[in-house]
Amino acid sequence: MANWHEWAELLERVREENPLVHNITNVVVTNWTANGLLALGASPVMAYAKEEVGEMAKLAGALVLNIGTLNDKEVEAMLVAGQAANEAGVPVIFDPVGAGATRYRTETARRIAEQVKLAVIRGNAAEIANMIGEAWTIKGVDAGGGSGDRVALAKRAAEQLGAVVAITGKEDVVADGQTTYLIQNGHPLLTKVTGAGCLLTSVIGAFAAVERDAAAAAVAALVYYGVAAEQAAAKAGERGPGSFQTAFLDALAYTSVDDVKRHGRVEQR
Ligand code: ATP
Ligand code: TZP
Ligand code: MG
Ligand code: MG
């Protein structure tokens, strides 16, 4: 494995380059995503109209597509933006929120993956399984009680979808078809903050904007995010999810490359 400690330094590159991240995301997490990207040191923009998304995507360092509260108009804009980003060589990161919960979500997630070249797809195990036609229980937008080999699932999905796949949960798995990485950082309180996954997908976008190796960008983003959550939980976890959420936003800003190298738990499989 390329030394993941080297990849951890991408955090500094994000902060130096302050990349523009174009998000077409859901109504639940819009403000949280913008604030999280600002705390990290990236520059967020949300733009949804099909009349402008192609132009915006081409200006950005990365495009993030998220189907959390999808509708036809937005999906059309996602396809326009995705294709413009592909033409301009801008990496596209996809969050298939709720794929498998309804037919519309599953079909849309697959359609986006077919029509747009995706650099990274990040979701819970159920969403990723359903994208490749495998059954896995899902409860609304949250991972259901399904169980299975998540490492093997990530590998299959990366091969079939031709993208780096990140499956998150208690333990995160990143697969690029050849190599698989396991990241053991994070905190259970992240599951009590809506949009913790969605913001993470946009954070991967910020890292992908400064690093063309999408697996390196995804691993670096995940380990940074998990370490930030651990620091936030140590400071404010006892007070509950509200205090944790605020502390986590702060931790996204102050977590350093050194913290990530010191506390990161990454293995290659
Ligand atoms: P879900 O739809 O299942 O809620 P999500 O899209 O919100 O998923 P998560 O899988 O919860 O996304 O991942 C968001 C972040 O939370 C990741 O950094 C992940 O490592 C972390 N995380 C999730 N569950 C746990 C846990 N039980 N312990 C530690 N970290 C966790
Ligand atoms: N409903 C539709 S999108 C959304 C909810 C609750 C946010 C999901 O965010 P995450 O990051 O998957 O927890
Ligand atoms: Mg969640
Ligand atoms: Mg999610």
Image (spheres, grey):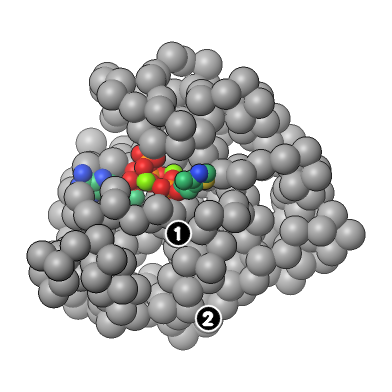
Q: Position of residue 231 (x, y in %)?
A: 17, 70
In this rendering, position of residue 39 left or right of residue 187: right
Which residue, as the protein is rendered here, is positioned at the far bottom? 16
**Disc 1 residue: CB within 8 Å of ligand 2:** yes
Label 2 crowd (10 A; few <14 / some 14-19 / many >=20): many
In this rendering, position of residue 234 left or right of residue 154: left
Please state, as top left, top right, bottom left or bottom right, where the C terminus lies in the image. Answer: top left
- Whole-angstrom CA distance, mark 1 to mark 2, is 16 Å
User: Is disc 2 placed on a helix, strand or loop?
Assistant: loop
Q: Residue at x 64, y 71 (%)?
A: 45
Q: Position of residue 64 (x, y in %)?
A: 60, 55
User: Is disc 1 placed on a helix, strand or loop?
Assistant: helix
Residue identifier under label 1: 199
Give the residue type that dot 2 points to.
Asn
Does residue 260 appear in the picture of this structure? Answer: no
Q: Residue at x 28, y 66 (%)?
A: 242
Label 1 crowd (10 A; few <14 / some 14-19 / many >=20): many
* Residue 260, above or below 54: below
* Residue 108, above or below 214: above
Residue identifier under label 2: 18
Q: Residue at x 81, y 58 (%)?
A: 49
